[in-house]
Image: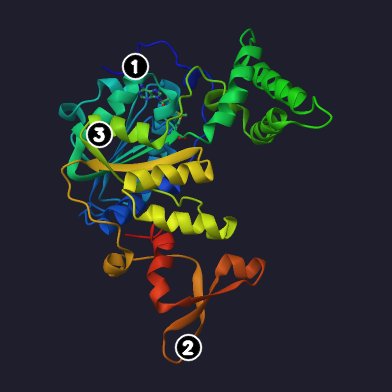
Amino acid sequence: MDTSDASPTPYDQVLYPAAVYPEAHPDRLATVGTLRGMHPAPLNGCRVLELGCGTGENLIALAFSFGKSEFVGLDSARSPVALGKASIEELRLTNIQLHPVDLCEASKERFGSFDYIIAHGLYSWVSPLTRERILALCHELMTPHGIAYVSYNAYPGNHLRDLARGIIRFHTMRCGSPPEKAQRARAILKFLAESRIVPNAYVTALRVEFERVVKQQDEVFLHDDLGKINQPFYFHEFISAAHRHNLQFLGEAGPDDLHAENFTSDTIAKLSELEKEEELICEQYKDFLIGRAFRRTLICRSEVPLVPASVPARASTLYASCDAEPVHRSETGDTMRIVSASERSRAGNESRVTRGFIPTCLFGVAVSGCF
Ligand SMILES: C[S@@+](CC[C@H](N)C(=O)[O-])C[C@H]1O[C@@H](n2cnc3c(N)ncnc32)[C@H](O)[C@@H]1O
């Protein structure tokens, strides 16, 4: 059943800005899977499903690049899907379909199985029942070596956002139009953020939040912060939910922002100890350390045997692309000076890369490179 007879959803009333998300590109998913010993489907010959695809911009870009793959997008809001369909028609793409369908109605019989499943900006913003269905679908619709990407707001970073959310939701509950709501929400945060001569911890937190939301587009602010549901999760809570659906943690689609230069030597020493712990425990403590507020977690079927991510052992099976250019190679070939083309035009920064280090660098590159 599609949603053509259903009443408009908040995403029909205020259109969510279309975007492409590089972190959810199947080449990243496939790269992480390969490094952990999986055999992911080739990018130009796979099936990709996006849940909550909105206008389908992300899928359209993929469909354009990979003509031999098939792309299916589902979204319960009719207006964005109609806009996406018009773009697909204009571009004459025949390998992509968008359906105005509630994901709770999706099934294998109707849509088949998929090598890659993307659910970006969805999990934290739907009801508990729909959340369970997202994970159930990841298991049901995924091929044996399939990989799913599920992003969500994370604790502990989101406690700050929760603080502001309680205030702005209360302050705007009687607002009429969406623009008025966004304006009033920012106004109360600004008022509170500037309320004390010497800011205490509470006011400092509100200032941080005000600075964040003041940069946001109204449409994003209205849905992400002022919407009815915005439920963050600790990493361990998300993983427990995934386990209930016979899914396991594969990795993160993006870097963890744990830059050693930002931490004390004692912290770095503790981190090395932590690396020896069980992977899931280690991941959770890293979130505590960096105050992570958003995760892009990759999951696969529980029965898939995974090995620890080994870049040196498997990097040779991957292709990488980036804008770095070699500018000097040592005589032994062990070290190389590289420069990022975009950086060079800005500041002329060069980095030295030793051969043993290249695969480690590649990991950062490969996740955005071509598989
Ligand atoms: C925050 S937007 C994210 C859109 C896009 N994925 C992005 O990140 O730019 C959430 C999308 O999920 C859709 N959505 C919410 N609940 C849904 C459901 N039960 N079934 C299908 N789509 C749903 C909304 O209509 C909306 O387009």
Label disc, if present, on residue 330 of the rendered structure: 2
| Picture residue at 32% right of the left edge, 36% below the top | 239
- Contact check, label 1 and label 2, Cβ < 8 Å: no
Report x, y in % for residue 370. 36, 60
Residue shown at 22% from the left, 57% from the top: 37
Coordinates of residue 319 in the picture (x, y in percent): 33, 66
Amino acid on which disc 2 is placed: Ser
Disc 2 crowd rating (10 Å Cα; few below 14, some 14-19, many 20+) is few
Residue 145 visible at all: yes
The span from disc 1 to disc 2 (Cα, nearest Å) is: 62 Å
Badge 3 crowding class, 10 Å Cα cut-off, few under 14, some 14 to 19, many 20 or more, is: some
* Disc number lying in front (2 or 3): 3
Judging by the rendered image, the residue that carries numbered circle 1 is 3
Quick check: can you spot residue 115?
A: no
Q: Are marks 2 and 3 in contact (CB under 8 Å)?
A: no
In the image, which disc is placed on residue 12? none
Q: Helix, strand, or loop for circle 1?
A: loop
Sequence-earlier tag: 2 or 3: 3
Distance from Cα at disc 1 to Cα at disc 3 = 31 Å
